[in-house]
């Protein structure tokens, strides 16, 4: 991956990133996370990149992309690398512009001795599967990777087999994330505690991609902002069906929650 070059305008390390996903309006937890990233960057002397994870075109909406820029502006958060407008995101910084990099990383993993296999099992089969390994024993077969029919999975040490390349022919989050962070030159990653396992897997995956730098990145996890039922806030669960309230009271609440998370 090192041979494909750095991101346009990328800066010298140390660099962290905002990585929002425009699959819904950003909720309170997202706003606090952005503030935590910004605060840690300021304290540590890191620069910040904006990495918009817009790979899932079926869920991305223009109003959700707009919301990212509007929320960052309202919070007064700045960044040093990345798109400054929706148009610039589309032309230069969108994940859709890096499909060849993801395909290259996929091919390199498949050509290596990495414990990956092509799987024909459906998401429903995996959801109901109990035990180690593939529910359809695909890891013992020699299937071809065909968009619409099969996915690429990684046989992991703890019995979980994460998806590396999706059945719909798109890169899975894990692969896209480590490729993007390498492309940008990210050296410091700040993310929620819900991604602890993702970090562990991504460090392993990165070692099988030539030039991938994620394995050496410094990763900091922070506690999550929970709802009144002590559950994680989630766009997919409807935590933010409308744009976040832009009131002074909400801004102060975000600041207070940010201070609490930074305090540990």
Image: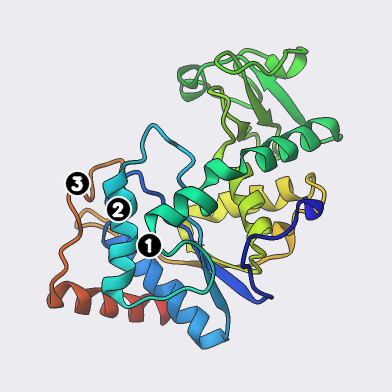
Picture residue at 39% right of the left edge, 66% below the top? 33
Do callouts 3 and 1 mark residues in contact (Cβ within 8 Å)?
no
Query: Is disc 3 placed on a helix, strand or loop?
Result: loop
Q: Nearer the viewer, residue 86 or 141?
A: 86
Query: Is disc 2 placed on a helix, strand or loop?
Result: loop
**Image quarter for residue 218?**
bottom right
Q: Which mark is residue 224?
A: 1
Horizontally, residue 114 falls left or right of residue 41, namely: right
Among the two numbered marks 3 and 1 on one chain, the one whose residue lies closer to the N terminus? 1
**Neighbour tally class for label 2: few under 14, some 14-19, many 20 plus, Cα within 10 Å:** some
Do callouts 2 and 1 mark residues in contact (Cβ within 8 Å)?
yes
**Image quarter for residue 185?**
bottom right
Q: Position of residue 138 (x, y in %)?
A: 69, 15
Q: Which residue is mark 2?
A: 233
Q: Position of residue 176 (x, y in %)?
A: 60, 45
Q: Which residue is mark 3?
A: 241
Q: Position of residue 213 (x, y in %)?
A: 74, 59
């Amino acid at each position: 991956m090192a041979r494909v070059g750095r991101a346009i305008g990328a800066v010298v390390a140390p660099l962290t990133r905002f990585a929002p996903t425009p699959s819904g309006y950003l909720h309170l937890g997202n706003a606090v996370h952005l503030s935590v990233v910004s605060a840690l960057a300021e304290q540590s002397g890191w620069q910040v990149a904006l990495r918009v994870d817009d790979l899932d075109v079926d869920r991305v909406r223009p109003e959700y992309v707009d919301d990212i820029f509007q929320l960052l502006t309202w919070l007064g958060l700045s960044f040093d690398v990345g798109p400054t407008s929706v148009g610039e995101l589309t032309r230069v910084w969108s994940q859709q512009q890096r499909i060849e990099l993801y395909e290259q990383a996929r091919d390199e993993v498949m050509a290596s001795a990495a414990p990956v296999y092509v799987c024909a099992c459906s998401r429903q089969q995996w959801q109901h599967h109990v035990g180690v390994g593939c529910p359809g024993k695909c890891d013992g077969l020699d299937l071809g990777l065909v968009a619409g029919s099969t996915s690429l999975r990684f046989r992991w040490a703890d019995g979980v087999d994460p998806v590396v390349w999706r059945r719909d022919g798109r890169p899975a989050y894990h692969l896209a994330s480590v490729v993007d962070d390498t492309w940008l030159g990210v050296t410091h990653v700040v993310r929620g505690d819900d991604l602890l396992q993702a970090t562990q897997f991504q460090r392993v995956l990165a070692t099988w991609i030539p030039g991938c730098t994620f394995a050496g990145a410094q990763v900091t996890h922070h506690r999550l902002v929970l709802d009144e039922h002590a559950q994680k806030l989630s766009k997919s669960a409807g935590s933010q069906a409308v744009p976040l309230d832009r009131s002074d009271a909400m801004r102060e609440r975000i600041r207070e929650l940010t201070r609490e998370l930074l305090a540990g």
